[in-house]
Amino acid sequence: MILKNIRVPLVGILAFCVITAAAATRTEEKKPPRHGIKQPHPMHTPSKEYILYKDWRQPVEARVEDLLKRMTLAEKIGQMTQIDRVNITSQIMKDYMIGSLLSGGGSVPKAHATPKDWVDMVNDFQKGSLQTRLGIPMLYSIDAVHGHNNVYKATIFPHNVGLGATRDPELVKRIGAATALETVATGIPYAFAPCIAVCRDPRWGRCYESYSEDHTIVQQMTDIIYGLQGQPPSNYPKEYPYMEKGKVLGCAKHFVGDGGTVNGINENNTIIDWNGLLNIHMPAYLDSIRKGVSTIMISYSSWNGVKMHANRDLIINYLKGALKFQGFVISDWQGIDRITSPPNANYTYSVEASVNAGIDMIMVPYDYKGFISNLTLLVNKQVVPMSRIDDAVRRILRVKFIMGLFEKPLYDYSLADKVGNQEHRELAREAVRKSLVLLKNGKQPNSPLIPLPKNTTRILVAGKHANDLGSQCGGWTIEWQGMSGNNLTKGMFKGTTILGAISSTVNPRTEIIYSENPSTELINNNKFDYAIVVVGEPPFAETNGDSLNLTIPEPGPSIIKNVCGSVKCVVVVVAGRPLVVEPFLQDMDALVAAWLPGSEGHGVTDVLFGDYGFTGKLARTWFKNVNQLPMNVGDQKYDPLFPFDFGLTTNPIPKDY
Ligand code: GLC
């Protein structure tokens, strides 16, 4: 549904509505509802009363106001409530008029759930919501942050830190579109992506979710919103939420300054003046709003000691006031509980402070009765004004009308085969190729090791990360924290390990010896033409990834020393951020930052063996030692091992070579 001239003065809106309504009664129904399933025309109920908000031909704002004035306080607060799906039934959705559900990381219908299982689950909850008095459909959301990553056999794309190294917004837009398609295929219309954090310290456990330390790269990568939601036409209001049919709502997160906390401590305090916040952490929000992002999620962190979840000045006065954001603002998971220290010390205060700060939808996610009763009490005592409730519900309804949820609340199985399809895997493989950064190539000038020869007698592949799809994908994959190993027994992943890619790339006559941690005997008793050493970090998410030392976990360093001390070696680092490599650099013939490449390991061998050239550029400064941190491009004191924007290039080997 494309809206025209939305931001006209009120009288214009009224006139506009009258004009449109008149037009609607005159013209035959030009467009069928937004899905194939024929349903009784939504405009007329059995009583034959005309219900404006159910008429898809009415202007969005008219539908919003018509529905809002019909709603009770309980119905309004229900819309502001988002809960996790676990232990929820469609009856609860109906009885409590819950406006939104989510799958927290790993919260799936069942292990190995197929797209049809997902569609059935979401539709079942939706049917409960559609049975409420006003029939307001609920909004189902999920963290599809590097593909539809909770879902069995979905395509897993590189995490954002790798995408920043591609410097390719068009690629990232295509990834957004593929992610949207796989998400819609499971009946889910809302993704908590993109994370537009500007990670200023790699000790932050979520740094891999950030495209770059440089806000200009993060700004460019907000083009993913066009892929997720669709691209608004040029005459579409810039601050207005947007979503096309067959797409998903996006969510720019986490507002604001999540990547700037002290020592990268997750959910901690970002100490920076207003200009610093505006110049580093805010620009990508202006781009996201301009590109029509429909929702914005608040950060757990604080700005100069003020919790963002209670920051009325930044949410109401700046985001909604100065920036005129017209979508809805959502809290993070138990984000309001963490306003107090310890968390939940005074939940009534948390509800009051967060809602009065301008948060529209609260990701509760479990105690919905507690949230609803507290907010009801606060409104009845006029501690939270009804005008604040109405602003929140107006924004939520606006998004639900714009995305066509009233016309198409239920999904079907028609896109099921899009999940993990070959086209998306090829796209992911392209993204891996373009994300890898070649940091060293040869111990002597003009003695490059890369591209590696495919036709050799014997090669050594060493390190657990060569044969570990879970670590290759990182956190936010199947489980919230990710899953190391290949889980082939549980069949959780479909993809190619780096070892698997090597095996199918080198000449079949080449002997490949693989060892997670090769012994001195193995190394010395065989003549290897070269070795590929793949080391890195285990999967993790959020605070579990905070690290003050950023060392490569053992036996990584030992493997590097043992192997590279005897065999020509390329070291491939699988990690969501720069790690301590300086002490081992002189041992290596070549060094590659692979970041967290995801399911398509072939993207790594494509550039290692020269089918494609290396093009990636560091989107993050690679430090010498952690005592230098934080250290970012532009700092006066800047003495990196590899500077921001560094990356060696190689030429692809001609196919007929
Ligand atoms: C998490 C994250 C946020 C995510 C949300 C829902 O704690 O902070 O990025 O979207 O909860 O899973």
Image: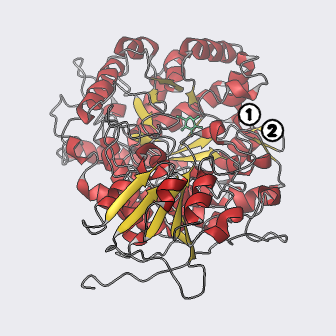
Q: Along the horizontal axis of the image, is 259 left or right of 506?
A: right
- SS for tag 2? strand
Circle number at residue 42: none
Q: Would residue 196 be seen by someone viewing this image from the given angle? A: no
The amino acid type of the residue labelled 2 equals Val
Nearest the viewer among 643 and 509 is: 509
User: Quick check: 632 above or below 37?
Assistant: below
Q: Along the horizontal axis of the image, is 115 left or right of 565?
A: left
- Split into quadrants, the picture shows ligand 1 in the one at top right
Tell me which residue sits at (50%, 52%) in the image: 518
Nearest the viewer among 132 and 474 is: 474
Q: Which residue is mark 2?
A: 306
The amino acid type of the residue labelled 1 equals Ala
Circle number at residue 310: 1
Q: Where is residue 160 drawn, in percent x and y?
A: 52, 55
Image-quadrant location for residue 579: bottom right
Q: Where is residue 596 drawn, in percent x and y?
A: 50, 53
Nearest the viewer among 352 and 251 is: 251
Mark 1 in CB contact with mark 2 (< 8 angstroms): yes
Q: Along the horizontal axis of the image, is 387 left or right of 231?
A: right
